[in-house]
Image (cartoon, rainbow, N blue to C red):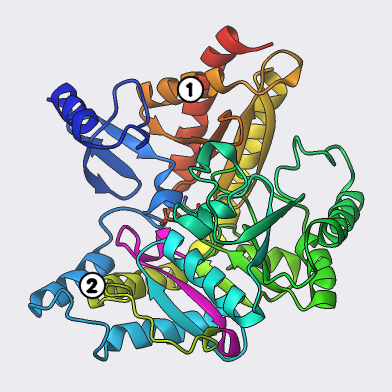
Amino acid sequence: MGEDLLRRHRAVLPSWLALYYDEPIEIVSGRGRRVTDSAGRTYLDFFAGILTNAIGYDIAEISDAVRAQVDTGVLHTSTLYLIRKQVELAERIAELSGIAGAKVFFTNSGTEANETAIMLATQYRRSNQILALRNSYHGRAFATIGITGNRGWSASSLSPVKVSYVHGGYRYRDAFRGLSDPDYIRACADDLREVLLTTTSGDVAALVAEPIQGVGGFNVPPDGLFAAFKEVLDEYGILLISDEVQTGWGRTGEHFWGIGAHGVTPDAMTFAKGLGNGLAIGGVVARAELMDSITANSISTFGGNPVATAGAKATLDYLLDHDLQGNAAKLGDRLLTGLRQLGERLDVIGDVRGKGLMIGVELVGPGGAPNPAAATAALEETRERGLLVGKGGLHNNVLRLAPPMTLTDAEASEALDILAASLDAVNSRHAR
Ligand code: PMP
């Protein structure tokens, strides 16, 4: 059965549509933090939190909200008509954004959200120059691929924007590695200044950045880095756009938005993935002046449709009512502590980093070199033991842990046990 589906998948879907595992899984149901595949095996899902299911599976409040909309007989008509839930959700997000007088535009994905933000910034600033972080990932359309600083994901060089990359992403291996937090921040701010002077004409539209790089391997910059960046940007009038597609909605524990760790308010934020807890929704929240800088008409046929906004509203209510941000902070600390202890014991673990429920474990080989084979093996080992984790990073050697934010203490312990056993096995075969 599974093999037949895999054969058909390969025959009819693009070769570049990556699949995890030697024998890819087909998930057929989910409850809480667990999913079951078509072979009847159940897994604790430590990656869904980033992919889509930010807060877990089969949450009655979300299913009921979606069902109530489905029961009206209208899945969607058009965004050319008023949609009450879209307005209500936009009001909530505008308020939560901390951006004074913010406006919201809904899309169906993170890519579209970033494309929209780039369009707004380039239009507003009358410039097609964008700054991005090295090792970034922002999506898979032309402008977003154009500002993605990771060759493995840059499918095309035909970008409509001119991009300049700055440091501040992959601290574990970049040119400023090993510096103290204040020195690292200073070096990155100096680098930004130099890039502006040497590779741009100064009238850059925006810096677009993930506060913690997701696809790039859950790279956590020192708190305050973006405040130092903003000081430089402000001298030139350059906008700051925070890509919160992975870091939004309290996942990082300490703050509701990833950029919150830096004590600055961006001009715009983009979001997607977890907001709909599985439904396709994304968007941009921006200063009204920036949002309204487009004069032509521009609609998204499905962006902000009633089903997606009903689910997103219920997701937002649930995560705020249950203080899932607090839970992410508490259980994130537990996981980080447990993994760091494991790291002291196992040579294959080069770095453990993260914030809240966004934790990266970088696997290394001899001399600390990136060890992608170990990461591939770790995915198989954890899957064998009933745990799904993600993989990423510039060298594809970082395990990415991002469980749903409803995670329990017992599940955190279970995952730590599985990770210890799996990485023990990997260590004996793949360590330095
Ligand atoms: N920005 C970030 C930070 C992301 O992680 C992603 C998805 N991996 C995107 C944008 C693009 O989102 P989507 O896949 O929904 O287009």
* Picture coordinates of residue 88, whole percent (x, y): 37, 87
* SS label for mark 2: helix
The quadrant the N terminus occupies is top left
Q: Is residue 126 visible?
A: yes
Q: Residues within 10 Å of mark 2 (few under 14, many from 20)?
A: many
- The location of residue 312, given as percent across then percent down, is 35, 71
Q: Which residue shows up at 53% across the image and 72% down it?
A: 119
Report if residue 92 lies within the magenta region: no
- Amino acid on which disc 2 is placed: Val
Any part of residue 323 in sight: no
Question: Which residue is pictured at 89% across the width and 42% down the height?
Answer: 179
Q: CA distance from mark 1 to mark 2?
A: 37 Å
Give the residues drawn in magenta, as a range: 271-290
The residue shown at (35%, 47%) is: 33
Q: Is residue 92 left or right of residue 136?
A: left
Q: Position of residue 64 (x, y in %)?
A: 20, 70
Say whether residue 1 is left or right of residue 417: left
Q: In the image shown, does 163 or 326 lie closer to the viewer?
A: 163
Which sits in the foreground, 337 or 426? 426
Relative to 73, is 255 on the left or the right?
A: right
Q: Position of residue 213 (x, y in %)?
A: 61, 50
Mark 2 within 8 Å of ligand 1, using the beta carbon? no
Quadrant of image for the C terminus? top right
Residue at image mark 1: 376
Asked whether residue 283 is drawn in magenta, I would say: yes
Disc 2 marks which residue? Answer: 307
